[in-house]
Amino acid sequence: MNNIWRLGFLVRGCQHYLSLRTAPKFTTKLVRRCTSSANSRHVKDGRRWRLIVPTGVGLSLLAVTQWNYLHKHGYPIDVDGRPELLNDVMVTCYCCLPLRTTSRIWGWLMSIDLPVSLRPTLYGLYANMFHANLDEVELDLSVFPNLVEFFVRALKDGMRPVAQNAEMISPADGKVLYFGPVNSCRVEQVKGVTYDLRQFLGDLPDSSSAQMTKDVKDNYVTSLLKNPDNRLYQLIIYLAPGDYHRFHSPSDWNIKFRRHFPGKLLSVNPKVLRYMPNLFSLNERVVYVGEWAGGFMAYAAVGATNVGSIKIYCDGELATNMMQWPETVHWKEASLGCTRVAKGDLFGEFRLGSTIVLLFEAPRDFQFCLQLDQTIKVGQALSACFDKRNSERDGRQIEQHLVMNVAHNWKDICKPKV
Protein backbone atom coordinates (compact mmCIF):
# COMPACT_ATOMS: atom_id res chain seq x y z
CA MET A 1 0.00 0.00 0.00
CA ASN A 2 2.85 2.36 0.78
CA ASN A 3 4.45 1.57 -2.58
CA ILE A 4 1.26 2.45 -4.42
CA TRP A 5 1.03 5.79 -2.57
CA ARG A 6 4.67 6.55 -3.36
CA LEU A 7 4.14 5.67 -7.02
CA GLY A 8 1.12 8.02 -7.25
CA PHE A 9 3.07 10.80 -5.56
CA LEU A 10 5.94 10.30 -8.06
CA VAL A 11 3.54 10.45 -11.04
CA ARG A 12 1.92 13.69 -9.80
CA GLY A 13 5.36 15.17 -9.25
CA CYS A 14 6.42 14.33 -12.81
CA GLN A 15 3.24 15.89 -14.21
CA HIS A 16 3.85 19.04 -12.22
CA TYR A 17 7.45 19.17 -13.43
CA LEU A 18 6.43 18.77 -17.06
CA SER A 19 3.81 21.51 -16.72
CA LEU A 20 6.43 23.88 -15.36
CA ARG A 21 8.73 23.08 -18.29
CA THR A 22 6.14 23.48 -21.04
CA ALA A 23 3.83 26.24 -19.70
CA PRO A 24 6.33 29.11 -19.87
CA LYS A 25 7.03 28.38 -23.53
CA PHE A 26 3.35 28.50 -24.42
CA THR A 27 2.79 31.57 -22.26
CA THR A 28 5.80 33.31 -23.74
CA LYS A 29 4.60 32.65 -27.28
CA LEU A 30 1.12 33.92 -26.43
CA VAL A 31 2.51 37.04 -24.80
CA ARG A 32 4.79 37.67 -27.76
CA ARG A 33 1.90 37.34 -30.19
CA CYS A 34 -0.33 39.72 -28.20
CA THR A 35 2.52 42.17 -27.79
CA SER A 36 3.40 42.09 -31.47
CA SER A 37 -0.23 42.62 -32.54
CA ALA A 38 -0.63 45.47 -30.07
CA ASN A 39 2.63 47.01 -31.25
CA SER A 40 1.55 46.73 -34.88
CA ARG A 41 -1.78 48.44 -34.14
CA HIS A 42 0.02 51.10 -32.14
CA VAL A 43 2.45 51.68 -35.00
CA LYS A 44 -0.41 51.96 -37.50
CA ASP A 45 -2.33 54.39 -35.27
CA GLY A 46 0.84 56.34 -34.67
CA ARG A 47 1.57 56.58 -38.37
CA ARG A 48 -2.01 57.68 -39.03
CA TRP A 49 -1.90 60.46 -36.44
CA ARG A 50 1.57 61.48 -37.61
CA LEU A 51 -0.03 62.14 -40.99
CA ILE A 52 -3.36 63.64 -39.89
CA VAL A 53 -2.17 66.04 -37.20
CA PRO A 54 0.64 67.77 -39.15
CA THR A 55 -1.58 67.96 -42.24
CA GLY A 56 -4.46 69.59 -40.33
CA VAL A 57 -2.17 71.97 -38.47
CA GLY A 58 -0.29 72.82 -41.66
CA LEU A 59 -3.47 73.58 -43.60
CA SER A 60 -4.82 75.72 -40.76
CA LEU A 61 -1.56 77.68 -40.51
CA LEU A 62 -1.52 78.09 -44.27
CA ALA A 63 -5.06 79.45 -44.23
CA VAL A 64 -4.26 81.87 -41.40
CA THR A 65 -1.10 83.04 -43.14
CA GLN A 66 -3.00 83.57 -46.39
CA TRP A 67 -5.74 85.57 -44.67
CA ASN A 68 -3.19 87.74 -42.84
CA TYR A 69 -1.29 88.38 -46.05
CA LEU A 70 -4.40 89.33 -47.98
CA HIS A 71 -5.67 91.61 -45.23
CA LYS A 72 -2.24 93.24 -44.88
CA HIS A 73 -1.65 93.93 -48.55
CA GLY A 74 -5.28 94.44 -49.50
CA TYR A 75 -7.43 93.46 -52.45
CA PRO A 76 -7.91 95.08 -55.83
CA ILE A 77 -10.93 97.38 -55.85
CA ASP A 78 -13.33 97.48 -58.79
CA VAL A 79 -15.16 100.49 -60.17
CA ASP A 80 -18.04 100.18 -57.69
CA GLY A 81 -15.75 100.42 -54.71
CA ARG A 82 -16.38 96.82 -53.72
CA PRO A 83 -13.62 94.40 -52.67
CA GLU A 84 -12.69 91.59 -55.02
CA LEU A 85 -14.28 88.33 -53.85
CA LEU A 86 -12.38 85.13 -53.18
CA ASN A 87 -12.12 82.81 -56.15
CA ASP A 88 -13.50 79.27 -56.18
CA VAL A 89 -10.13 77.68 -55.39
CA MET A 90 -9.62 79.70 -52.23
CA VAL A 91 -13.22 79.13 -51.12
CA THR A 92 -12.85 75.38 -51.66
CA CYS A 93 -9.59 75.28 -49.70
CA TYR A 94 -11.15 77.25 -46.87
CA CYS A 95 -14.20 74.96 -46.73
CA CYS A 96 -11.95 71.87 -46.61
CA LEU A 97 -10.29 72.95 -43.37
CA PRO A 98 -11.30 70.82 -40.33
CA LEU A 99 -13.15 73.73 -38.72
CA ARG A 100 -15.88 71.56 -37.19
CA THR A 101 -13.30 69.38 -35.44
CA THR A 102 -11.34 72.38 -34.19
CA SER A 103 -14.59 74.01 -33.03
CA ARG A 104 -15.51 70.93 -31.00
CA ILE A 105 -12.01 70.80 -29.49
CA TRP A 106 -12.15 74.51 -28.68
CA GLY A 107 -15.59 74.11 -27.12
CA TRP A 108 -14.29 71.24 -24.99
CA LEU A 109 -11.30 73.30 -23.82
CA MET A 110 -13.53 76.24 -22.93
CA SER A 111 -15.77 73.87 -20.93
CA ILE A 112 -12.97 72.77 -18.57
CA ASP A 113 -13.67 73.98 -15.03
CA LEU A 114 -11.24 76.57 -13.73
CA PRO A 115 -9.93 76.92 -10.16
CA VAL A 116 -12.24 79.14 -8.13
CA SER A 117 -9.41 81.42 -7.03
CA LEU A 118 -8.32 82.10 -10.63
CA ARG A 119 -11.77 82.72 -12.13
CA PRO A 120 -12.12 86.46 -11.36
CA THR A 121 -8.61 87.18 -12.64
CA LEU A 122 -8.98 85.17 -15.86
CA TYR A 123 -12.44 86.54 -16.62
CA GLY A 124 -11.18 90.03 -15.91
CA LEU A 125 -8.33 89.58 -18.39
CA TYR A 126 -10.77 88.30 -20.97
CA ALA A 127 -13.08 91.27 -20.36
CA ASN A 128 -10.20 93.73 -20.82
CA MET A 129 -9.09 92.00 -24.00
CA PHE A 130 -12.54 91.90 -25.66
CA HIS A 131 -14.12 94.95 -23.97
CA ALA A 132 -16.79 93.07 -22.03
CA ASN A 133 -18.70 95.10 -19.44
CA LEU A 134 -18.42 93.25 -16.14
CA ASP A 135 -20.60 95.81 -14.33
CA GLU A 136 -23.64 94.32 -16.09
CA VAL A 137 -23.03 90.75 -14.90
CA GLU A 138 -25.68 89.49 -12.49
CA LEU A 139 -23.56 86.95 -10.56
CA ASP A 140 -20.11 87.06 -9.02
CA LEU A 141 -17.34 86.03 -11.42
CA SER A 142 -16.23 83.15 -9.21
CA VAL A 143 -19.61 81.46 -9.75
CA PHE A 144 -18.96 80.74 -13.44
CA PRO A 145 -17.14 77.38 -13.60
CA ASN A 146 -15.68 77.86 -17.09
CA LEU A 147 -15.41 80.30 -19.98
CA VAL A 148 -18.46 78.91 -21.79
CA GLU A 149 -20.70 79.64 -18.82
CA PHE A 150 -19.14 83.10 -18.60
CA PHE A 151 -19.97 83.70 -22.28
CA VAL A 152 -23.67 82.99 -21.68
CA ARG A 153 -23.77 85.04 -18.48
CA ALA A 154 -27.04 86.61 -17.37
CA LEU A 155 -27.31 90.36 -16.87
CA LYS A 156 -28.68 92.33 -13.97
CA ASP A 157 -32.35 93.22 -14.00
CA GLY A 158 -33.04 96.42 -15.89
CA MET A 159 -29.77 96.42 -17.86
CA ARG A 160 -31.64 95.87 -21.16
CA PRO A 161 -34.91 97.84 -21.00
CA VAL A 162 -37.35 96.92 -23.76
CA ALA A 163 -38.70 99.80 -25.86
CA GLN A 164 -42.42 99.72 -25.19
CA ASN A 165 -43.34 102.12 -28.00
CA ALA A 166 -41.76 99.93 -30.71
CA GLU A 167 -43.26 96.78 -32.20
CA MET A 168 -39.84 95.50 -33.32
CA ILE A 169 -36.74 95.64 -31.11
CA SER A 170 -33.15 94.46 -31.35
CA PRO A 171 -32.89 90.73 -30.50
CA ALA A 172 -29.21 90.79 -29.49
CA ASP A 173 -26.23 92.87 -28.47
CA GLY A 174 -23.73 93.34 -31.26
CA LYS A 175 -22.68 95.18 -34.37
CA VAL A 176 -25.13 96.02 -37.16
CA LEU A 177 -23.67 94.53 -40.34
CA TYR A 178 -26.60 95.25 -42.64
CA PHE A 179 -30.24 96.33 -42.61
CA GLY A 180 -32.85 97.37 -45.13
CA PRO A 181 -35.53 96.05 -47.52
CA VAL A 182 -35.16 92.74 -49.36
CA ASN A 183 -36.13 92.93 -53.03
CA SER A 184 -34.71 89.70 -54.48
CA CYS A 185 -33.21 86.35 -53.52
CA ARG A 186 -29.73 87.88 -53.62
CA VAL A 187 -29.57 89.54 -50.22
CA GLU A 188 -26.61 91.49 -48.88
CA GLN A 189 -24.78 89.90 -45.93
CA VAL A 190 -22.52 92.95 -45.81
CA LYS A 191 -22.27 95.90 -48.14
CA GLY A 192 -21.59 94.67 -51.68
CA VAL A 193 -21.51 90.93 -50.84
CA THR A 194 -24.65 88.78 -51.07
CA TYR A 195 -26.07 85.39 -50.14
CA ASP A 196 -28.97 83.35 -51.58
CA LEU A 197 -32.11 83.79 -49.51
CA ARG A 198 -33.85 80.71 -50.90
CA GLN A 199 -30.89 78.51 -49.96
CA PHE A 200 -30.76 80.20 -46.58
CA LEU A 201 -34.43 79.58 -45.67
CA GLY A 202 -35.36 76.70 -47.95
CA ASP A 203 -38.61 76.28 -49.91
CA LEU A 204 -41.94 76.95 -48.27
CA PRO A 205 -43.43 73.92 -46.50
CA ASP A 206 -46.80 74.25 -48.26
CA SER A 207 -45.32 74.25 -51.78
CA SER A 208 -42.79 71.63 -52.84
CA SER A 209 -40.32 72.29 -55.62
CA ALA A 210 -42.27 70.02 -57.96
CA GLN A 211 -45.55 71.88 -57.40
CA MET A 212 -44.14 75.37 -57.19
CA THR A 213 -45.14 77.53 -60.12
CA LYS A 214 -42.65 79.45 -62.18
CA ASP A 215 -43.94 82.76 -60.79
CA VAL A 216 -43.26 81.68 -57.23
CA LYS A 217 -39.78 80.44 -58.15
CA ASP A 218 -39.00 83.75 -59.80
CA ASN A 219 -40.56 85.77 -56.94
CA TYR A 220 -39.49 83.88 -53.86
CA VAL A 221 -39.50 87.01 -51.72
CA THR A 222 -43.06 87.87 -52.74
CA SER A 223 -44.22 84.35 -51.89
CA LEU A 224 -43.08 84.86 -48.28
CA LEU A 225 -45.31 87.89 -47.70
CA LYS A 226 -48.73 87.53 -46.10
CA ASN A 227 -49.80 90.92 -47.44
CA PRO A 228 -48.68 91.75 -51.02
CA ASP A 229 -48.69 95.46 -50.13
CA ASN A 230 -45.95 94.94 -47.54
CA ARG A 231 -42.20 94.49 -47.95
CA LEU A 232 -39.62 92.09 -46.53
CA TYR A 233 -36.88 93.62 -44.36
CA GLN A 234 -33.62 92.27 -43.00
CA LEU A 235 -31.38 92.95 -40.01
CA ILE A 236 -27.98 91.26 -39.44
CA ILE A 237 -26.25 91.52 -36.04
CA TYR A 238 -22.75 90.18 -35.38
CA LEU A 239 -21.97 89.13 -31.80
CA ALA A 240 -18.31 89.76 -30.97
CA PRO A 241 -16.49 87.70 -28.29
CA GLY A 242 -17.03 90.40 -25.66
CA ASP A 243 -20.77 90.81 -26.26
CA TYR A 244 -23.66 89.47 -24.22
CA HIS A 245 -24.25 86.08 -25.87
CA ARG A 246 -27.90 85.50 -25.06
CA PHE A 247 -30.48 86.62 -27.61
CA HIS A 248 -34.11 87.59 -27.16
CA SER A 249 -37.39 87.74 -29.03
CA PRO A 250 -37.66 90.82 -31.27
CA SER A 251 -41.44 91.00 -31.06
CA ASP A 252 -44.61 89.22 -30.02
CA TRP A 253 -44.86 86.35 -32.50
CA ASN A 254 -45.90 82.74 -33.05
CA ILE A 255 -43.32 80.14 -34.16
CA LYS A 256 -44.72 77.62 -36.65
CA PHE A 257 -41.68 75.45 -37.31
CA ARG A 258 -37.93 75.20 -37.06
CA ARG A 259 -35.40 74.23 -39.70
CA HIS A 260 -31.92 73.08 -38.76
CA PHE A 261 -29.44 73.25 -41.63
CA PRO A 262 -26.23 71.26 -41.06
CA GLY A 263 -23.31 72.89 -42.81
CA LYS A 264 -19.88 74.44 -42.44
CA LEU A 265 -18.60 76.40 -39.48
CA LEU A 266 -16.84 79.18 -41.36
CA SER A 267 -15.94 82.39 -39.60
CA VAL A 268 -18.66 85.07 -39.65
CA ASN A 269 -16.26 87.85 -38.74
CA PRO A 270 -17.08 90.94 -40.86
CA LYS A 271 -13.58 90.85 -42.36
CA VAL A 272 -14.35 87.37 -43.76
CA LEU A 273 -17.91 88.23 -44.83
CA ARG A 274 -16.57 91.01 -47.05
CA TYR A 275 -14.71 88.59 -49.29
CA MET A 276 -16.73 85.37 -49.24
CA PRO A 277 -20.20 85.48 -50.81
CA ASN A 278 -23.02 83.13 -49.82
CA LEU A 279 -21.37 82.37 -46.49
CA PHE A 280 -24.65 82.42 -44.54
CA SER A 281 -26.07 79.76 -46.87
CA LEU A 282 -23.01 77.53 -46.32
CA ASN A 283 -22.83 77.67 -42.53
CA GLU A 284 -24.79 75.60 -40.06
CA ARG A 285 -27.85 77.55 -38.93
CA VAL A 286 -31.15 77.25 -37.10
CA VAL A 287 -34.11 79.09 -38.65
CA TYR A 288 -37.40 79.64 -36.81
CA VAL A 289 -40.29 80.63 -39.08
CA GLY A 290 -43.56 82.14 -37.91
CA GLU A 291 -45.74 85.23 -37.93
CA TRP A 292 -45.92 88.49 -36.03
CA ALA A 293 -48.40 91.37 -36.18
CA GLY A 294 -46.84 92.60 -39.42
CA GLY A 295 -46.85 89.19 -41.16
CA PHE A 296 -44.01 86.79 -42.00
CA MET A 297 -40.98 86.46 -39.73
CA ALA A 298 -37.84 84.30 -39.84
CA TYR A 299 -35.38 84.34 -36.93
CA ALA A 300 -32.05 82.67 -37.75
CA ALA A 301 -29.08 81.89 -35.50
CA VAL A 302 -26.00 81.23 -37.67
CA GLY A 303 -23.15 79.04 -36.42
CA ALA A 304 -19.50 79.96 -36.81
CA THR A 305 -15.97 78.76 -36.14
CA ASN A 306 -15.39 77.85 -32.48
CA VAL A 307 -19.10 78.05 -31.64
CA GLY A 308 -19.67 75.05 -29.38
CA SER A 309 -23.44 74.94 -29.83
CA ILE A 310 -26.62 76.96 -30.26
CA LYS A 311 -29.24 76.53 -27.55
CA ILE A 312 -32.89 77.57 -27.95
CA TYR A 313 -34.90 77.59 -24.73
CA CYS A 314 -38.24 76.61 -26.28
CA ASP A 315 -36.72 73.84 -28.43
CA GLY A 316 -35.22 71.14 -26.22
CA GLU A 317 -34.74 68.68 -29.09
CA LEU A 318 -32.29 70.92 -30.97
CA ALA A 319 -28.70 69.60 -31.17
CA THR A 320 -26.09 71.55 -33.16
CA ASN A 321 -22.41 71.11 -34.03
CA MET A 322 -22.65 67.33 -34.29
CA MET A 323 -19.63 65.25 -35.27
CA GLN A 324 -21.09 64.04 -38.56
CA TRP A 325 -24.26 64.63 -40.59
CA PRO A 326 -25.88 62.30 -43.17
CA GLU A 327 -25.00 63.50 -46.64
CA THR A 328 -28.61 63.11 -47.81
CA VAL A 329 -30.01 65.50 -45.21
CA HIS A 330 -30.54 69.07 -46.44
CA TRP A 331 -32.28 70.23 -43.31
CA LYS A 332 -34.09 68.82 -40.31
CA GLU A 333 -37.52 70.30 -39.72
CA ALA A 334 -39.56 70.26 -36.52
CA SER A 335 -42.99 71.70 -35.80
CA LEU A 336 -43.29 73.87 -32.70
CA GLY A 337 -47.09 74.14 -32.84
CA CYS A 338 -47.34 77.94 -33.04
CA THR A 339 -45.31 78.51 -29.88
CA ARG A 340 -45.99 81.99 -28.54
CA VAL A 341 -42.98 84.16 -27.65
CA ALA A 342 -43.35 87.64 -26.17
CA LYS A 343 -41.27 90.66 -27.09
CA GLY A 344 -38.05 90.79 -25.11
CA ASP A 345 -38.29 87.24 -23.77
CA LEU A 346 -35.12 85.13 -23.65
CA PHE A 347 -34.96 83.06 -26.81
CA GLY A 348 -31.57 81.32 -26.89
CA GLU A 349 -27.82 81.55 -26.44
CA PHE A 350 -24.60 81.09 -28.39
CA ARG A 351 -21.86 79.01 -26.82
CA LEU A 352 -19.27 81.59 -27.99
CA GLY A 353 -20.10 84.27 -30.59
CA SER A 354 -21.91 84.27 -33.91
CA THR A 355 -24.59 86.09 -35.94
CA ILE A 356 -28.33 86.75 -35.82
CA VAL A 357 -30.24 87.23 -39.09
CA LEU A 358 -33.75 88.65 -38.70
CA LEU A 359 -36.16 88.70 -41.67
CA PHE A 360 -39.61 90.18 -41.17
CA GLU A 361 -42.55 91.55 -43.13
CA ALA A 362 -43.64 95.13 -42.48
CA PRO A 363 -45.48 97.99 -44.23
CA ARG A 364 -43.65 99.85 -46.93
CA ASP A 365 -43.30 102.94 -44.76
CA PHE A 366 -41.26 101.05 -42.15
CA GLN A 367 -38.05 102.96 -41.49
CA PHE A 368 -34.99 101.74 -39.56
CA CYS A 369 -33.40 104.12 -37.06
CA LEU A 370 -29.99 102.45 -37.36
CA GLN A 371 -26.61 102.99 -38.95
CA LEU A 372 -24.23 100.47 -40.43
CA ASP A 373 -21.50 99.26 -38.06
CA GLN A 374 -23.18 100.79 -35.04
CA THR A 375 -23.35 98.98 -31.71
CA ILE A 376 -26.86 97.88 -30.77
CA LYS A 377 -28.32 96.47 -27.54
CA VAL A 378 -31.16 94.11 -26.71
CA GLY A 379 -34.48 95.95 -26.42
CA GLN A 380 -33.45 98.91 -28.54
CA ALA A 381 -36.14 100.03 -31.02
CA LEU A 382 -35.42 99.24 -34.67
CA SER A 383 -37.68 101.98 -36.01
CA ALA A 384 -38.41 105.49 -34.80
CA CYS A 385 -41.84 106.33 -33.43
CA PHE A 386 -42.76 109.75 -34.77
CA ASP A 387 -44.87 112.35 -33.05
CA LYS A 388 -47.66 113.29 -35.43
CA ARG A 389 -48.12 116.64 -33.70
CA ASN A 390 -44.79 117.78 -35.08
CA SER A 391 -44.96 117.03 -38.81
CA GLU A 392 -41.97 119.17 -39.67
CA ARG A 393 -39.67 117.18 -37.38
CA ASP A 394 -41.18 113.95 -38.70
CA GLY A 395 -40.39 114.97 -42.27
CA ARG A 396 -36.75 115.63 -41.43
CA GLN A 397 -36.38 112.27 -39.64
CA ILE A 398 -38.10 110.34 -42.44
CA GLU A 399 -35.88 111.98 -45.02
CA GLN A 400 -32.78 111.16 -43.00
CA HIS A 401 -33.80 107.50 -42.64
CA LEU A 402 -34.52 107.25 -46.36
CA VAL A 403 -31.03 108.53 -47.05
CA MET A 404 -29.63 105.98 -44.59
CA ASN A 405 -31.40 103.11 -46.33
CA VAL A 406 -30.01 103.89 -49.77
CA ALA A 407 -26.58 105.26 -48.87
CA HIS A 408 -23.55 103.20 -49.84
CA ASN A 409 -20.85 105.20 -48.09
CA TRP A 410 -21.62 106.21 -44.53
CA LYS A 411 -18.53 108.40 -44.31
CA ASP A 412 -20.08 110.85 -46.79
CA ILE A 413 -23.26 111.56 -44.80
CA CYS A 414 -23.93 113.01 -41.42
CA LYS A 415 -25.19 110.74 -38.70
CA PRO A 416 -28.82 111.69 -37.96
CA LYS A 417 -29.85 112.40 -34.43
CA VAL A 418 -32.58 109.91 -33.55
Image (cartoon, helix red, strand yellow):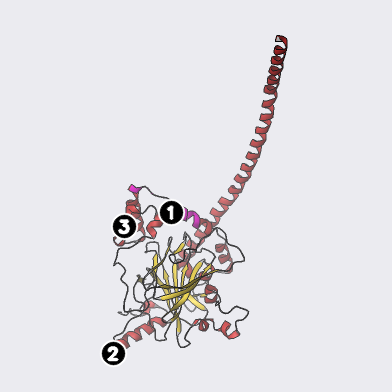
Nearer mark to the viewer, of 3 and 2: 3
Q: Which of 128 and 211 is in front in this view?
A: 211
Q: Earlier in the sequence, mark 3 or mark 2?
A: 3
Mark 1 is on which residue type? Met
Q: In this view, does 126 lie above or below 298?
A: above
Residue 126 seen in render: yes
Q: Is residue 285 above or below residue 214?
A: above
229 in the magenta segment: no
Residue that numbered label 2 is attached to: 392
Q: Position of residue 393 (x, y in %)?
A: 28, 87
Residue that numbered label 3 is attached to: 139
Q: Residue 110 carries which label?
A: 1
Q: In this view, does 276 lie to the left or right of 409?
A: right
107 in the magenta segment: yes
Q: Could you tell me how far apart the alpha carbons at marks 2 and 1 are, in whole angstroms?
A: 54 Å
**Secondary structure found at label 1:** helix
Q: In this view, does 412 lie above or below 10?
A: below
Give the quarter of the image for residue 178: bottom left
